[in-house]
Image (spheres, coloured by chain):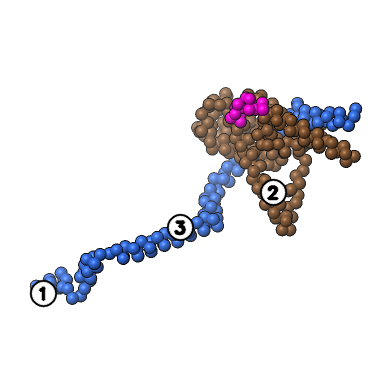
Chain colours: A blue, B brown
Amino acid sequence: MNKQQQIDKMTDEALNSLDGADRATARPYLFTRLKARMERQDESAWENVGRFIARPAVVVAGLCVIIALNVLAITSNNSTASNTSVAEQSATQDEFSPSIASLYDTENNEQ
Amino acid sequence: MNQPELVVQLQQGDESAFRKLVDEWQDMVYNTAVGIVQNPDDADDITQEVFVQVFQSIHSFKGDSKFSTWLYRITVSKALDHEKKKNRKKRFAFVQGLFGGKEEEQLHPVEFDHPGVLAERKERAAALFQALKQLAPNQRIAFTLHKLEGQSYQEIAEIMNTTLFAVESLMGRAKTNLKKILNDYYRESFDDK
């Protein structure tokens, strides 16, 4: 038998080496280990939530959202302040002006 | 107890039905997983993950396919996920190794010895398992299900959610590629002598 024939024979043997193989059997006490694993998973559900929140990516994303909300709030305040009409401004001035008699003063004068 | 009855009991959260299911199917799940990942510890881990998944998602099993087909699908998908995770770790270990870490043993995995293979075929089987690692995942899964689990091409098509023709084609390509890889391997070992 020449070299190539030998190689072909070995290749065919390798290709057919799983024929008639038995099933590999799972390790003993699988159900017991499985139950313990499932109980552990139940207990660690909250730990997982905590771990998720503590991830650097989540922390950074959270901070970015907070900063963005703050920037949004500041810019929208500025724009509403500049849009406030003169009438509104004077109404506010009148309301807080000490020179205008309030309802309280009117009641006092009546007495 | 027949399969539909067992499924109904599982859906009702019956623990004894779950125990029965595990006892009945554990070797099938383990054998499939160990054939794909070629590592007994990983296969044990995957087997547990599969049954946890079955327990959690039994309500989604509508009985459109056989229960065994559904179980094979979960096993194959968990095994592939496990492999992906392991490959990511290997890449990370490789990068760590470049910076002086001690992770080299993970880069050179040991030869896999399937416990069910006949003693006189162990050496050839080890070479075959090494060659299997070089195949595309679909070819490897089809070949493993057929050779290790004795599944017919039709059953493999149902498990892989594809056509019979596609499985025949996958098996053809798998055999051709394996033949080439093994041929090269044995030629090299001849040349080394």
The Cα–Cα distance between marks 3 and 1, rounded to whole angstroms, is: 55 Å
Q: Is residue B154 above or below residue B75?
A: above
* Residue at x 81% of width, y 31% of height: A11
- Categorize mark 2 by other alpha carbons within 10 Å: few (<14), some (14-19), many (20+): some
Task: Please report, as a chain letter, where disc 2 is located.
Answer: B
Residue B96 image position (x, y, % from top left)? 70, 55
Residues at discs 3 and 1 in contact (Cβ within 8 Å)? no
Badge 3 vs badge 2, beta-carbon distance below 8 Å:
no
Q: Main secondary structure of the magenta part?
A: helix
Q: Which residue is mark 3?
A: A65
Region in magenta: B156-169
Q: Which mark is residue B90?
A: 2
Q: Chain of mark 1?
A: A
Q: Quadrant of the N terminus of chain B?
A: top right
Q: Which mark lies nearer to you, 3 or 1? A: 3
Q: Which residue is mark 1?
A: A109
Identify the element where label 3 is drawn: helix
* Quadrant showing the C terminus of chain B: top right
The amino acid type found where label 3 is placed reads: Val
Rendered image quadrant of residue B27: top right
Circle 2 — which element?
A: helix
Q: For numbered disc 1, what is the local secondary structure?
A: helix
Residue at 55 percent across and 49 percent down: it is: A44
